[in-house]
Amino acid sequence: MPYDHHTPPQGALDLYDKYAHGLMSRRSFMEKLGTYAVGGLTVAALMDQLLPNYALAEQVKPDDERIVAKDIPYSSPNGAGDMMGYLVMPKDASAALKKPGVVVIHENRGLNPYIRDVARRVALAGYVAFAPDALFPLGGYPGNDDDGRVMQRERDREEMVEDFASAVTYLQNHEATTGNVGCVGFCFGGSVSNRLAAKMPSLKAAVPFYGGGVDEEDVPNIQAPLLIHLAELDERVNTGWPAYAAALKANAKEYEMHMYEGANHGFHNDTTPRYNAHAAELAWARTLAFFEEHLD
C-alpha cells in the first residue's frame, strides 16, 4: 500500500527536496520548516510526514513465490572493487530459459527498501533485476536515509558510475540472461542511467527518472534509446532539461521525454508524500512497455 498520509504543503516538500539533496543543512531545514507548522501541527510531526515510511515499500513481498531474490557479491575493478547487489529473478529464469536484464539504480542514499521493492517489481515483469548498493564499500545501506545520504557523499561519484557499469556487465554475462540489459534509475540513479547510456555502447535501453543529463560533449556517445521521466514541479532537475534536449536532438539520438503534470521530484517513490499515484503508475507502465520493445 503506498503512502497515505496527508500531503504536506508544497513549500515544505520543496524544502525537503533541498535538504535531501545536500543543498540545506538539517538545522536550517528544521528552522525553515517551522513556517509550515501551523494549526497545531508541530515541526516534529511535519518532519515525520516528510520522511519515507518504508513499511509501505512492499508492492512485491521479498518472499513472493513468483521470484527468487538474494544479495550477491560482484566485482567492480574500476570502481570500489568488491561490491554487492540485490539479484531478483523470475522463478522460471535459468540458463535454459533466459530473460533480459535490468540494472536498478538507487537514489542518493543507498539501497533502501523502496529500491529493493522496485527490483522485485522488475523481476515480476519478467526480467532479471540487479540493484547494486553503492554504500557497500562503507558498510552498506545503514537502515535510514539521513545516514545513507551522508555516507554516499563520502564516495567518489565517478567510482560509483563504474560500480553500476560493472553491474551492467555482470548481468550481460549472467547465465540466466539473454545478454540484453537495460537500466532504470531514480534521482541520483536517473543521472547515472544517463551516464551509462553514454558510457556503455552495449546498453540496450535506459530509463532515467528525474535525473540530470550528461554533458553536451558526451551526448554523441549515447547509443541506447532513452525514456526520460520528469516531474513538472521539479525545478532543480528541470533547469538542465532544455540544454540536454537540444543536444539529444542535435545528435539525432533516440529518446522520448514525459513531463508529469503536478508531480514532484521523487513521484515514483510510494513511501513518501511526494508520491503521485497517477504519474507513478503511468510512468511505470511506459517503462515496462519500453523495456519490452528494446530488451525482449
Image: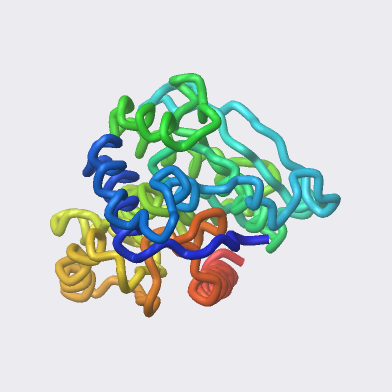
Residue furthest toward the bottom?
261
* Residue at x-position 74% and y-position 44%: 62
Quarter where residue 190 is shown: bottom left
Q: Quarter of the image for the C terminus: give it.
A: bottom right
Location of the N terminus (image quadrant): bottom right
Quick check: 283 above or below 104? Answer: below
Residue placed at 55% from the left, 46% from the top?
A: 172
Q: Position of residue 268 (x, y in %)?
A: 50, 62
- Identify the residue shown where x is 34% and y is 65%: 10
**What is the quadrant of residue 261 in the picture?**
bottom left
Q: Which residue lies furthest to the right in this view?
A: 65
Image vertical order of residue 143 relative to residue 38, above or below = above
Residue at 15 percent of width and 67 percent of height: 243
Residue 92 in the figure: left or right of residue 182: right
Any part of residue 129 in sight? yes
Point out residue 68 in the picture as x, y percentages from the top left corner.
77, 44
| Residue 118 point in image, percent of width and height | 60, 53
For the question of whether residue 105 can be seen, the reply is no
In the image, residue 177 sits, relative to residue 245, either above or below, namely: above
In the displayed structure, 106 sits above or below 38; it is: above
